[in-house]
Image (spheres, rainbow, N blue to C red):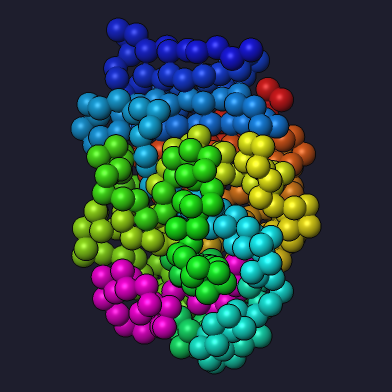
Amino acid sequence: MKTEMNNSSAAHSVAHSVSGYIASGYEPVRDAFAANFTDNLEGGAGFCVYKSGELIVDLIGGTKDRRGDTPWQTDTLVPVFSTTKAVAALVIAWLVEQGRLDYEQTVASLWPEFAAYGKGGLSIAQTLSHQAGLSGITEKMRPEDWFDWDGICARLAAQKPIWEPGTKSGYHPLTFGFLAGEIARRADTKHRTLGTILREEFCTPNDIDFFLGTPESEHARTADLHKPKAMANFGEINAATKAAFLQPWSSPGRRGTAAWRTAEFAGANGHGTAKSIARLMQLALDGHIGETRYLSETTLASLSKERITGPDLVLPFELSFAAGLMHSTPNYFYGPNPDTLGHSGWGGSCTFADRKTGITCAYVMNKQSHALLGDERPLRLIDALYRCL
């Protein structure tokens, strides 16, 4: 049985109000969600969980604006940064299912220019698991150059890898989206962008409120971000880390918020709700959204297969990568089951699919922390969730 709850009262400011749906037996998840607000860890946030396709948790709380005056709504959109990579990986998996791609084929078989500087043998699966040696752009450019899709793709194709491709993982915060997006565009029969494929094949048919390339008509309901107050800990800085995060041109800029929201950075600027992301992650659970099957067990096995594991060159963690998604092992940021597939985004957002329990889950927020992975707010929620199962 689901119960609707709203525990805001005269004693709570709008910033601490929590509302939504909670299935009977999952009340500790609501309590953990509310505690994140009372502990002043949140601005506004959403948390959604499905179990075997049934909605069991759908909570929102707090405010969407920087001043803290406007309540977070069920349709409030928020940028989820690298949690977008999980969605991009699912679009690539659909192209595999359609016979347009094979994870083991080389990127250069679709994109001949990509073979420069010894990248010709790099497979699509290796590229999606951050093994390309292209964690950032190494040649000097302007922050606004990121808005030139063809220009960035040309740079990546021509760039010398920072490390030998296929030997190690080094997280690609922005370049992942261009690599995955260009692979998708070249493989698709209509040469659609990854965001267009997502909208036309998944979101519009299933009424899923997620955008990659967010139209201006939706910007008014998008939450303001509260930027983190501390720098992330990148560990020992090397050439791969410097290219990924620390160059003056390592992130897009100088074009304004509206241009950034509207652009397609296929691994970094998806906008959605927790509910929309949890629904999309059902593809990684059993290949379905509702009654429609998009991915076969064969494709799911290829998507889920571990492609590389060990110390990452860019992030200060040991990581296990599938084809665009992370496994919960060895850090268990996505619950206790090692084969769970998930991804996190800058500031704290995350999503995962756990085939063992039938859970898909997503957490979104607008008050960003400096944690690169393992933000304490979703960890609290995920711990409460699994104690209820």
Q: In the displayed orientation, state which residue is furthest to the front.
A: 190
Lateral position of residue 378 relative to residue 121, left or right: left
Front residue (pair 336, 236): 336
Place of residue 379 in the rendered image (x, y in percent of width and height, measured from the top left): 56, 37
Q: In the displayed orientation, state which residue is furthest to the top.
A: 10
Place of residue 329 in the rendered image (x, y in percent of width and height, measured from the top left): 70, 51
Q: Is residue 231 magenta?
A: no
Place of residue 265 in the rendered image (x, y in percent of width and height, measured from the top left): 40, 62
Is residue 77 visible in this depiction of the protein?
Answer: yes
Seen in the picture, residue 65 relative to 108 is either above or below; the reply is above
Front residue (pair 347, 239): 347
Seen in the picture, residue 202 relative to 314 is either above or below; the reply is above
Q: Quadrant of the N terminus?
A: top right
Lateral position of residue 80 relative to residue 303, left or right: left
Q: Residue at x 63, y 36 (%)?
A: 290
Is residue 334 visible in this depiction of the protein?
Answer: no
Disc tally is 0
Front residue (pair 320, 104): 104
Q: Residue at x 30, y 80 (%)?
A: 141
Q: Which residues are magenta?
A: 127-155
Q: Residue at x 26, y 49 (%)?
A: 216
Q: Quadrant of the C terminus?
A: top right
Seen in the picture, residue 306 relative to 4 is either above or below; the reply is below
Q: Residue at x 25, y 27 (%)?
A: 70
Seen in the picture, residue 218 relative to 14 is either above or below; the reply is below
Front residue (pair 219, 146): 219
